[in-house]
Amino acid sequence: MSNILRQPLTGANTRKQKIEGGTMERTKFILEEKDMPTSWYNILPDLPEPLPPELHPATKEPTRLPPPLFPEAINSQEFSTERYINIPEEVQAVYRLWRPTPLYRAYRLEKALDTPAKIFYKYEGTSPAGSHKPNTAVAQAYYNKKEGVRRLATETGAGQWGSALAMGCVFFGLELKVYMVKVSYYQKPYRRILMETWGAKVVPSPSPDTEVGRRVLKENPDSPGSLGIAISEAIEDAFAHDDTKYSIGSVANHVLLHQTIIGQEAMKQMKMAGVYPDIIVGCVGGGSNFAGMFLPFIKDKIKGKKPDLRIICVEPQACPSLTKGVYTWDFGDEAGLAPILKMHTLGHSFMPPPLHAGGLRYHGMAPIICHLYKLGFVEAQAVSQVPVFEAGVKFARVEGIIPAPEAAHAIKVTIDEALACRESGQSKTILLALSGHGHFDLAAYDEYLSGKLADYEYPEEKVKEALAALPKVS
């Protein structure tokens, strides 16, 4: 049976297969290499209202460019008004190692749920790093190398971003220093080993290597770390070295831009399947993976072509920036070195609980997603950790793919929506953004399977404390 399921199906070809005594269609939609998009889609010129400006962290005044952290090409893309930006051939050449990525029809999950819903998932776990992150990591490494940068500094939560950037730096001959959130550094040692295999230097954050890290450790030697602290450390590192630039894996406009190759491919593949999604579901921490999926589709909603399209952003109950955060100006990092952004935030000093979905432990959210949320074009839900892993295990047992804990958040809501279709008798088409595999997260699955996995509630008092330290912006 498993051999049958692994048989490649090209184009929109569909096979009838005998599975467990019944007839079931198993469809895998694969684009050919020549069909891979050659440009990224930029949502900025299509927004119904302009995105609020980025503010300089010191002057708190609108700034055309962020502080000198990025190469000029990245700065330009951050604020570009061009609808499509060409993907350099050197970047395309690396993309072709795993792109285009497959789109699957989840017939087995549909059958297990006894739902009339049609469920599709776009799977980014086929990249060498196992997630969507190389889509921007490769591009950022290329632009830095082209402008003569020798070394990059970055942060990583669960390790997907750090491993992707380590891979990108190997391809373009750059050195890399990674500040990995401490709780994930110890929870996910294989991610660290993957980064080091690709040549990166990895330290747990907060670390003794920076002023920011030393300050946090002095105040709390047992600090589990956060993305906000790790970002501050990486930015401080970049400022301290003339040959170093900073690289970020989510939140920023240019990162979401690079990820739109996902949604553009998915649009072609859904057309091959002869359907258009009614609901698109994805997890959000900083928001780059899900935005990369839904931005090419949301253009149709903005223009009135698909007004009823639902786009559901799923976040952890323990770090719910969209559902319980405040939409206001805040620093992108803990120390206040990054630009000030208009976003839904829990406060830049907020320390999230040590949940296993490390990529979702961020105090804020991509300004583009927050802007669309404010305008009513996307919605948000927060879910707890134990039901998330229950959904991840269910998905693994019927579809065969062990999802990353981050992606399992989206699976939980996808299942909920499919069950709602069963109750109502409506047949909706659901598109799931499956951002990566969970092969390096098996310790977390072991905790769930052994009954030791804990849920973390919304830490209301800690959020109130963090929100009291928001920057004063007139």
Image: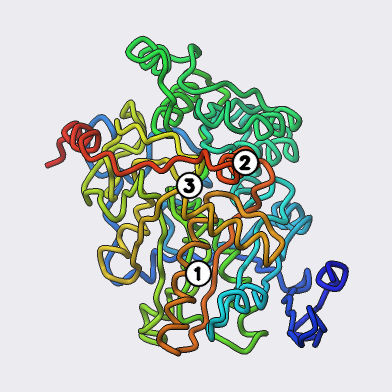
Residue 370 at what x, y percent from top left?
32, 57
* Vertical relation: 220 (above or below) 348: above
Residue closest to the far front = 451
Q: How packed is label 1: few (under 14 Cα within 10 Å), some, or many (20 or more)?
A: many
Q: Which mark is residue 250?
A: 3
Name which of mark 1 and mark 2 comes first in the sequence.
1
- Relative to 270, say whether 402 is above or below: above
Relative to residue 197, is residue 81 drawn left or right? left
Q: Looking at the figure, which quarter contains the C terminus?
A: top left
Residue 175 visible (yes or no): yes
Q: Position of residue 396 (x, y in %)?
A: 66, 59
Q: Amino acid at mark 1?
A: Ile
Judge the density around disc 3: few (<14), some (14-19), many (≥20) Cα neighbours within 10 Å.
many
Residue, x 71% and y 29% (percent of image)? 193
Residue at mark 1 = 415
Question: Image check: 336 left or right of 360?
Answer: left
**Which label is found at residue 446?**
2
| Figure quadrant of the N terminus | bottom right
Q: Quadrant of residue 45?
A: bottom left
Q: Position of residue 446 (x, y in %)?
A: 62, 41
Q: Residue at x 40, y 27 (%)?
A: 229
